[in-house]
Amino acid sequence: MAVHPKTFRYSSGRFILYLMLIVSSIMMIVPFYWSVSTSLKLEKFVFTNPPQWIPDPLTWVNYIHVLTRIPFLRYFANSVIVAVATTLGHVFFDTLAAYAFSKLKFPGRDRIFFIMLLALMVPFQVNLIPLYKIMATLHWTNTYLALIVPNLTSIFGIFLMRQFMLTIPNELLDAARIDGCSEFGVFRRVVVPLVLPGIATLIIFTFMGTWNDFLWPRIVTSSEKLFTLPVGLAQLQMKNTSNIAQIMAGTVLTALPMIIVFLFMQRQFIEGMTAGALKE
Amino acid sequence: MTAISPSRRLNRSVQKYAVGYTFIAVPLLSLTVFLFIPMVVSLWWSLNDYSGLTAAKFVGLNNYIKLLTDDKIFAKSLVNTTVFVLLGMSIGPTLGLLTAMMLNQNVRFRSLFRTAYYLPVMTSLVVVSTIWVMLYNQNGLFNTILQNLGLHKVGWLSDPHVALISIAIASIWQGFGFETVIFLAALQSIPRELYEAAMIDGAGGWAQFRFITLPSLKPVILFVYIIGIIGSYQVFDQVFVMTSGGPVYSTTTIVYYLFDKFMDLRLGYASAIAYILFAILVVFSFLQMRLSRERA
């Protein structure tokens, strides 16, 4: 029996579609796979021809080296401390300010908000150098303070949370006020529970941004003790150019925590990303 | 009857407003100390010869004049950055739209594919760059494959004609998953009925794309391009890790050059670079405002 031409065209179209999706996905995964595979090889097998897709012999020596002779665990701890503290700051201060900007009335409110939005356009490089100078004057360079305090709030975070809060009906807040709630009580008991999805988005954005940040931590830290993972990795990359297997062990250790968090919270990541973009 | 005295009324309104001001106090203070004041200071420094060690010396617009007329490396960094932006913007969003349209075809394992495209987006640029440095190595995976196909090795990061393109390729690979995810969400929000009506009218695949998909996506496309352009103009991490601006300044970008001058303690000069970058980005930001107002 002959295949119906239309079915054939349909299924060959599907075939090409899947082929393209699979090939392009492989191209996305191969660099990651290659770095994991390289990190488990002996240095002398890193650049063989034909390429060694599966490490033979498989060795943990690069990880052992990176974890014992380079303070990678320290970098990791620094990254966690900085990312967690920054994220907590954003969740508290941005959300609270967003509440004031969306639901409280006070003179100059909209003007201040407008100026903040304008400031969103300023690239970080413009205030970078004086900011460094401020840190140096306060003797904050090479301390957690320099890594955390200047980033404790963000205009984008306030803007994002305000967008979420604008959808809350005012009657709901008035009802709580009549029941004798203070403004902070209204915020904590009524507003926060209603914008939890927004807070999840804010957490993801902030944590990811801080975890991956490079320029600022690179500039305000010169002591290894304060390096975050990206700074430590870049340092390892520059110092050990000849030892690629070790660099890859460091790379995997730097990337892994974020990838694990991402795989577990994928839905929130994607929703957060699109909410940020499509809400504008 | 007790009338509320004016002073008490004032007191009350102060109290009422005080809550609002308290709630915005920390962000406002932080913004003032860490953004507004540094911005002004930076502008002042850009008009000075300043090393940070000795007193600043006012030189008027000299830094700007020197940068824009005399500094060949800065001119090169402007060209390099613009080429990088053009390369990225001509390929990244198109690739993102294509993959989003493929994923929108009711495919199986959609979220699995989406994960693959999105994985590099949430990975730090330093990580992505170290991986690509290895791939681009003289004896790395790419050159091994080329060799086995009987082709010549390429000096991916060592050839001044190729290095910037190599950085752009790695950056596109890293970033287009962001556009994929945004476009996919936007595609899914286009009402099905529009396509059904078009099919009844006899519109083919291309006509549907041209007259339904593209117009519906217009605001998102605008968003993606502007965000992309502004972000790409600030490219730094990849250059720092992959080439340090070389070979022979072929990958020196605006921010890398700024960083370089900062390290040389030419703070006034570096501040002027920052303000030139700012001016470029302001043009694109206003363009976005104009364009998005037009559609509204």
Image: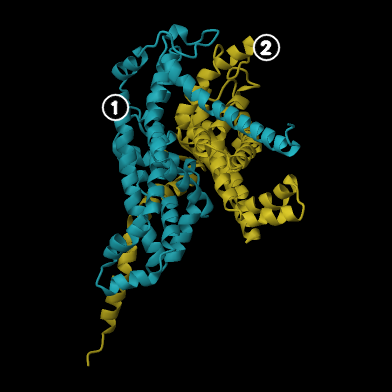
Would residue A198 appear left or right of B120 to someone viewing this image?
Answer: left
The vertical placement of A140 against B215, above or below, is above
A47 and A225: which one is in front? A47
Mark 2 belongs to which amino acid? Leu
Number of marks in the rendered image: 2
The residue identified by callout 2 is: B151
The chain that hosts pointer 1 is A
The chain in yellow: B
Indicate the amino acid at tag 1.
Answer: Arg
Q: Chain of mark 2?
A: B
* Image depth: mark 2 or mark 1 in front: 2
* Image disc number at residue B85: none
Instruction: Return the x and y of residue A143 as percentages of the image width and height.
Output: 29, 35
Decide: is A228 above or below A91: above
Residue placed furthest toward the bottom? B1
Q: Secondary structure at mark 1?
A: helix
